[in-house]
Image (cartoon, helix red, strand yellow):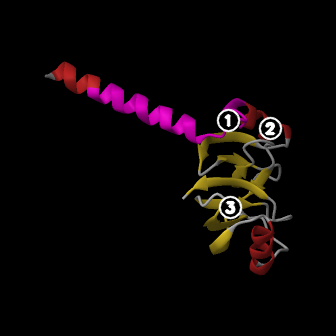
Amino acid sequence: MTNRLLQSAALATALALAGASAAQAQDALTAPQIRAQLEAQGYTDVKDVKFDDGMWEADATSADGKRVDVKLDPRTGTVYPDKAVSQLSEADIRAQLSSAGYTGVNDVKLDDGMWKAKGTTANGEKVEIHLDPATGAVVAQEKD
């Protein structure tokens, strides 16, 4: 009986890891590449690098010595500090998403330095969308 429990636990762990890997975009940067990207931009003491909600996240120390949480574009490695201020309004973001073909846009908010919203793609898929705080460009989307 113990062997069956161990086998079940091992299978559950393998499936969970496979699911996490599948959720990561196929063209996304790897954790070591993300760490290198942060260090190249002057961040130090980089910790807790993880892929979550369609984006990379990490804790680090900024060049001015402050502890920050950052999110990174999974393809380009562009860093979005959690305290970023946006010059765009909610109306700007809604307009950007509408012109990009999203419908039923709701829950639009600036959260942890990035714009986030929920909506439906042109294919009818419900998604959570992460947008660049400076340009309003879609950085990542994840099934909702």
Q: Residue at x 35, y 32 (%)?
A: 12
- The tag earlier along the polypeptide, 3 or 1, is 1
Q: Residue at x 81, y 76 (%)?
A: 92
Whether the magenta-drawn stretch holds residue 90 is answered as no
Q: Is residue 7 above or below residue 68?
A: above
Looking at the image, residue 104 sits to the left or right of residue 6; the answer is right
Q: Residue at x 83, y 74 (%)?
A: 88
Secondary structure found at label 3? loop
The answer to the question of whether label 3 and label 2 lie on touching residues, with beta carbons closer than 8 A, is no
Q: Nearer the viewer, residue 144 or 84?
A: 144
Secondary structure found at label 1? loop
Mark 3 or 2, which is nearer the eye?
A: 3
Q: Which residues are magenta?
A: 8-32
Q: Residue at x 20, y 23 (%)?
A: 4
Q: Position of residue 103 (x, y in %)?
A: 67, 70
Q: Nearer the viewer, residue 113 or 53?
A: 53
Amino acid type, residue under disc 3 in the picture = Ala
Which residue lies most toward the top here? 3
Amino acid type, residue under disc 1 in the picture = Gln
Q: Disc 2 to disc 1, how far (Cα)?
A: 18 Å
Looking at the image, residue 119 sits to the left or right of residue 1; the answer is right
Question: How many numbered callouts?
Answer: 3
Q: Position of residue 56 (x, y in %)?
A: 67, 45
Q: Which residue is mark 2?
A: 37
Q: Position of residue 96 (x, y in %)?
A: 80, 70
- The tag earlier along the polypeptide, 2 or 1, is 1
Q: Which residue is mark 3?
A: 122
Dominant secondary structure (helix, strand or loop) of the stretch shown in magenta: helix
Whether the magenta-drawn stretch holds residue 21 is answered as yes
Q: Disc 3 to disc 1, how far (Cα)?
A: 21 Å
Q: Position of residue 105 (x, y in %)?
A: 65, 73
Amino acid type, residue under disc 2 in the picture = Gln
